[in-house]
Amino acid sequence: MVAAGIFLVARLLPLFIAIPTIMNGIAFIGIITLFLGATLTITQKDIKRNLAYSTMSQLGYMMLALGMGSSRAALFHLITHAYSKALLFLGFGSIIHSMETIVGYSPEKSQNMVLMGGLTKHTPITKTAFLIGTLSLCGIPPFACFWSKDLILNDSWLYSPIFAILAYFTARLTAFYMFRIYLLGFILVVIR
């Protein structure tokens, strides 16, 4: 459902390509969405909000690619992001369920990343699956999102060096907030 706008722009791209101003506007909206989503993700403590803003940031990559006229890269990132995010959704559900047995049934407590930590002993399989999803979403080779992000980032250098610098910076922010979730959930031990 969140990708409906991406599909709409991709379907109407043959009409938009004729007017460069519209294409520049789409790319600008993409880079703003990309950067805004990543910075909002860093400020959140709720694990579900982290996932929502992370999706917003990744949709920014897709919109940037569409604005550059690279619809194949955008749709490729849509597919790779969907698989990686599905794995992370399953991991988030397992984490929240595990937290409910530890801190009680309270969405404020079970979804708060500050209260998480040391869940490896409760969910060892989830830790591995979550690490794979995290590595993929961060764009680490040879995982799926690496190939699609690489296409988008390489095309952005040809389109606008300023957009490319912002996109590369945001890719680093993606790695930061995804590994923050991973470390707070599984590695760091919280004294309760």
Image (spheres, rainbow, N blue to C red):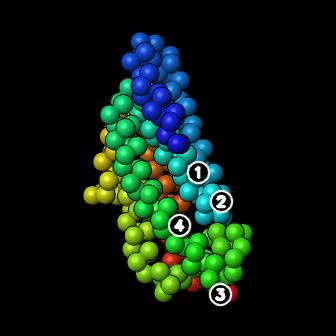
User: Mark 4 vs mark 2: which is more N-terminal?
Assistant: 2
Q: Residue at image x 45%, y 50%?
A: 171
Whether residue 191 is situated above or below residue 176 in the rendered picture: below
Element type at marker 1? helix
Amino acid, disc 1:
Tyr
User: Mark 3 vs mark 2: which is more N-terminal?
Assistant: 2
Amino acid, disc 4:
Phe
Answer left or right for 134 relative to 39: left
- Is residue 176 in sight in this rendering? yes
Numbered label attached to residue 92? 4
Q: Residue at image x 58%, y 47%?
A: 37
Q: Spatial distance from mark 1 to mark 4, Cα to Cα?
A: 14 Å
User: Mark 1 vs mark 3: which is more N-terminal?
Assistant: 1
Return the residue at label 1: 53
Return the residue at label 3: 191
Marks 1 and 2 close (CB-CB < 8 Å):
yes
> Percent from the top left, x then y, of residue 23?
47, 21
